[in-house]
Amino acid sequence: MSADFAVRPSAIQGLGLFALRNFNRGERLLAYAGSVSTVRPAQTSASSPIYALEIRPGLWLDGSGQANISRHANHSCAPNAELVFVDESAGAWLIAQENIPADAEITFDYGFNLAESLFQPCRCGQPDCIGYIIAAPRRASLRRHLRFSRPRD
């Protein structure tokens, strides 16, 4: 484990990834390590999380390995980092989107589509949180959908 990060309980969900030093905007934080495959990694049980990222349609990065501590970065509707896929040899990296102080939890937008989001409640606690893990560009559409799909009195 890197001396710059700690994995510990998170107010958002389960375990989280925390900075142990200050990071500057644009700084590479950690690689999201794992094997690349054309087959989506399967969930081992209903209670076990999946740490797979779809790099592009039909290409998956399985970050479930114990050595990949970046897998503990939780989703937030106001993230302080982003996950950037460089290429198959360099992999994906968490990059600071803003200055991150020591002891802050490192979060990123998981970028789920509508179908994925409806089964993934968001617990980030941000003021503009819609209650589901969904990509930032899709939040307004989901907010409209939820407003019009509620039962009427």
Image (spheres, rainbow, N blue to C red):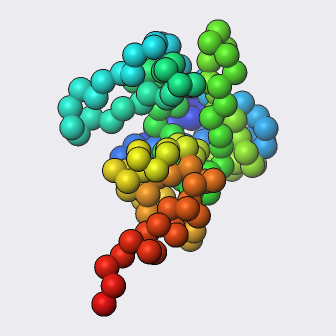
In this view of the protein, which residue sits in the foreground, 129 or 27? Answer: 129
Residue 74, image x, y percentages: 48, 45
Residue in view at x 69 percent, y 21 percent: 86
Image x and y of residue 99, in percent: 75, 48
Q: Position of residue 117 (x, y in %)?
A: 42, 50
Q: Quadrant of residue 116?
A: top left
Report if residue 39 is visible in the image: yes
Number of numbered callouts drawn: 0
Q: Residue 92: x percent and y percent?
A: 62, 24
Residue 106 appears in the figure: no
Residue at the farthest bottom position: 153
Q: Which of 108/36 is in front? A: 36
Q: Nearer the viewer, residue 1 or 146?
A: 146
* Vertical comparison of 114 with 29: above or below: below
- 61 up-or-down from 7: above or below: above
Q: Quadrant of the C terminus?
A: bottom left
Residue sitting at 67 percent across and 16 percent down? 87
Residue displayed at 41% across by 47% down: 115
Q: Residue at x 61, y 40 (%)?
A: 20
Q: Vertical placement of 4 versus 138: above or below?
A: above
**Residue nearer the viewer, 65 or 37:** 37
Q: Look at the picture and state if 10 lies above or below 64.
A: below
User: In the picture provided, is 52 more to the left or to the right than 56?
Assistant: left
Q: Quadrant of residue 81?
A: top right
